[in-house]
């Protein structure tokens, strides 16, 4: 993380105790797709018995200053055709900084994985409460749907972390939005595009999540547009829809 970038914890302090913090990635928290020589790529190649040329490090992130942790994380893609030709994307937790990781502590496969451009991918460390953090992920993929005669875009927003009793990170909250555009039948077109989730991290326990989405469906021959806000609350050890 660049020295001049403001941490999410610092943003909380500036915004005040009652603020909802929009956790957009700060400069230096996400990396451009890397060459195969990245040290994280080498670790994944060893773990998956894969070729370096088939691995892309999409983004990396470091812990918050308040954590005093030497660990880090990365979004990594393996695209060697082993899974029916589809790429696999993982969130990997690392022992040591992403620039010189000692080993992979844990990895979690994600449900959305870009096959081509990784534009729009994000990975940041986000505070959920005064004493709890999670990795915030954004990934999107676009594929051609031959049956529907159009293109489908899926965008994943997710929060991944550990709660009491966990040994590995798991999904604490996820939302996948889908946009479909048909070349032949516009009546089946639909769209949902969501902004970054807003988290209330001011309490001892994780506060509610609000995510704002622009939706569009086709009503007859006319598009019907709406703005919707979806909310989730912390219950036990994860978020549930409210």
Image: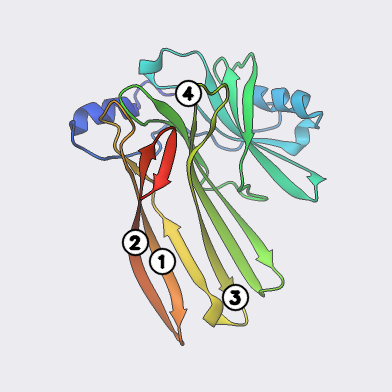
Q: Is residue 90 visible?
A: yes
Per the model, the C-alpha gap separating discs 3 and 2 is: 24 Å
Observer-side mark, 1 or 3, equals 1
**Numbered label attached to residue 182:** 3
Whether residue 47 is situated above or below residue 216 in the rendered picture:
above
SS assignment at label 1: strand
Residue 57 in the image, given as x and y percentages of width and height? 63, 33
Q: What's the distance in space between the residues labelled 1 and 3, CA to CA? A: 16 Å
**Picture residue at 45% right of the left edge, 74% below the top:** 217
Q: Tell me residue 48's x, y (percent).
A: 77, 29
Q: Quadrant of residue 201?
A: top left
4 or 3: tag closer to the N-terminus: 4
**Quadrant assignment for the N terminus:** top left
Give the mark nearest the N terminus, 4 or 1: 4
Q: Are marks 2 and 1 in contact (CB under 8 Å)?
A: yes
Q: Circle 4 sits on which residue?
A: 62
Instruction: Measure how far apart labels 2 and 4 are at the Cα level.
Output: 32 Å
Viewer-side residue, 86 vs 116: 86
The CA distance from mark 4 to mark 3 is 40 Å
Residue 228 is labelled as 2
Residue 52 lies left or right of residue 24; in this view the side is right
* x, y percent for residue 81: 81, 46
What residue sits right under mark 1 in the picture?
215
Q: Which residue is drawn at the image coordinates 41% and 37% (left, top)?
A: 25
For disc 1, the neighbor class at 10 Å (few under 14, some 14 to 19, many from 20) is: some
């Amino acid at each position: 993380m660049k020295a001049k970038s403001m941490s999410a914890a610092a943003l909380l302090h500036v915004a005040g105790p009652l603020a909802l913090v929009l956790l957009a990635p700060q400069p230096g928290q996400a990396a451009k797709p890397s060459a195969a020589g990245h040290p994280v790529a080498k670790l994944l190649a060893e773990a998956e018995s894969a070729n370096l040329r088939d691995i892309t490090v999409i983004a990396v992130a470091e812990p918050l200053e308040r954590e005093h942790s030497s660990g880090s994380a990365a979004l990594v893609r393996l695209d060697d055709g082993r899974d029916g030709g589809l790429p696999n994307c993982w969130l990997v937790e690392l022992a040591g900084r992403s620039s010189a990781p000692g080993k992979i502590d844990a990895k979690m496969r994600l449900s959305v994985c870009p096959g081509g451009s990784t534009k729009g991918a994000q990975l940041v460390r986000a505070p959920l409460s005064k004493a709890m953090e999670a990795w915030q992920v954004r990934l999107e993929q676009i594929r051609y749907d031959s049956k529907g005669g159009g293109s489908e875009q899926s965008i994943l927003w997710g929060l991944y972390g550990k709660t009491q009793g966990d040994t590995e990170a798991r999904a604490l909250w996820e939302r996948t939005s889908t946009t479909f555009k048909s070349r032949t039948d516009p009546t089946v077109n639909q769209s949902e595009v969501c902004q970054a989730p807003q988290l209330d991290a001011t309490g001892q326990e994780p506060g509610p999540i609000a995510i704002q989405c622009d939706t569009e469906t086709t009503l007859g021959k006319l598009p019907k547009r709406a703005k919707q806000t979806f909310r989730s609350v912390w219950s036990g050890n994860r978020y549930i829809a409210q």
